[in-house]
Every structure is written in structure tokens, then in C-alpha cells.
Image (cartoon, grey):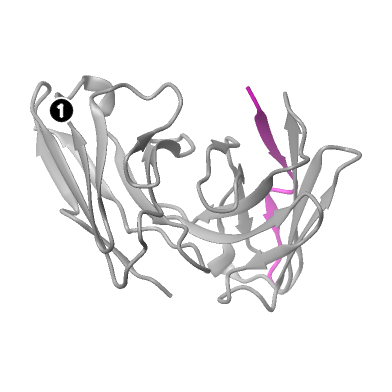
Amino acid sequence: QVQLQESGPGLVKPSETLSLTCTVSGGSISNYYWSWVRQPPGKGLEWIGYIYYSGSTNYNPSLKSRVTISVDTSKNQFSLKLISVTAADTAVYYCTRGGGTLDSWGQGTLVTVSS
Amino acid sequence: EIVLTQSPATLSLSPGERATLSCRASQSVSSYLAWYQQKPGQAPRLLIYDASNRATGIPARFSGSGSGTDFTLTISSLEPEDFAVYYCQHRSNSPRTFGQGTKLEIK
């Protein structure tokens, strides 16, 4: 059973860069797509983008100018960077397996954007 | 961008009753629709993929139907642990989008 675990700072200042890493255990990152999804407090889910293990990516146009998703197969990890954050980026960030159907999810990590 | 509209926003039922949740797409998504369950403080869990296929370990009381623009998630007989928020999501094109959710609460 694959497990995913998000890690990274829980507090980021406005205009700075949000950086999160997802560590995949219990299975290989190879041959799968991997996504990031976020959920502002008390609100619904928003797909951020996905990466294939080979490195090809697809981003939500609403975030495309600010988002980079990368993968490190040697560490069985993939990462999210979101630049120029504002309070609107405050959310629980989930890493998931899949590029369409999301069949495994990390527990999520709350990132608050505040000075 | 495909907009998914879920109804009702809130559904109040009792254990043992049948629940019917709806998801309507602004354009056809073929059968590329999934349903997720989310309990407070937890990550979403995949229930149904490609409109009607139960994910691994999902009880048979959960079923999905539909194609094109109209989809339904049915819970045949509600168990206490089924009261949660349910989201639909498509993978027909990019960007993937989610519905706004239906909260299933105990009556």
C-alpha cells in the first residue's frame, strides 16, 4: 500500500515562495503520475497540477505562472514550488497519486501565508 | 474549464436510508468522473472512478452511474460512518476540476 507524506514550512510570508515535498513510500514513484491538490480552510478542492515520473508536467492555468512541480526519482519524492504567495494561497496542500483519478492521498499539510 | 455542479449542497438523512447525490458537468466528460469522500480533518478518499467503478476496498453500498454530463453517487443504506462531504471530479481534460461538494449530514 503506497503512502504519501507532505513536508515543508507551515508558515510562509507574503510574496515569498511556498515549497513542499512529498515522499512516497511502499511503492516506486516510477510509471505513475503524481499531483498536488489544495483546499483553503472550510472550502473545496483545487487541482494544482501533475507530474509524470519522467518529468512532464501539466498545471492549472489559474496557477501556471507561479507553479513548478518537479520529481526526484532517486529519492522517491516530488515537490511543489509556488512563488509570490498571498493570503489567498493559505490552504491544506495534499500530494496524491494520479494525474486524473487520484487514488492515494497524503494526510495534507496546512500552509499559512502571513507576515 | 469544465464546471461541475453538485446538488444538493446539504443532504439530511438517517442511518439506513438511501442517499442520492448528483453531479452535473458544464460539458461532456464522457465517463471520466470520480467521487471522493472527505471526513473532517482527513484527506479525501477515492470511492468511485470512471463513473461506475468502485475503488479498492470500497463497500458495495456505494455505487456510481451516469455519463456525459449527468452523474449520480448512490449509497444504498447509510451507515454512521458515511456522513461526510462528497466531491465529484473529472479527468476529461485540463484543468481537472472538482465540484463544490455535498455535505451528507445526520437527520
B22 left or right, relative to B86: left
Q: Residue at x 46, y 34 (%)?
A: B42
Q: Is residue A3 magenta?
A: yes
For disc 1, the marked residue is B76
Residue B39 visible, this orientation: no
How many numbered marks appear?
A: 1
- Magenta stretch bounds: A1-14
Where's residue B60, x and y in %?
A: 28, 22
Q: Quadrant of the C terminus of chain B?
A: top left
Residue projecting furthest to the right: A74
Side (left or right) of B93 relative to A18 = left
Q: Residue at x 63, y 63 (%)?
A: A114
Task: Find the residue positioned furthest to the bottom.
Answer: A65
Queried whether the magenta region covers residue B6, the answer comes back as: no
Residue at 39% from the left image edge and 46% from the top image edge: B50
Q: Quadrant of residue A29?
A: top right
- Where A81 sits versus A14, above or below? above
Give neighbour class at mark 1: few <14, some 14-19, many 20+ (Cα, 10 Å): some
Say what amino acid the circle numbered 1 marks. Ser
Q: Please say whether residue B104 is visible from this viewpoint.
A: yes
Which sits in the foreground, A6 or A72? A72
**A63 displayed left or right of B87:** right
Against A34, is B48 above or below?
above
Question: Which residue is pictured at 72% across the width and 63% down the height?
Answer: A57
Residue A2's x, y, as percent? Answer: 66, 27
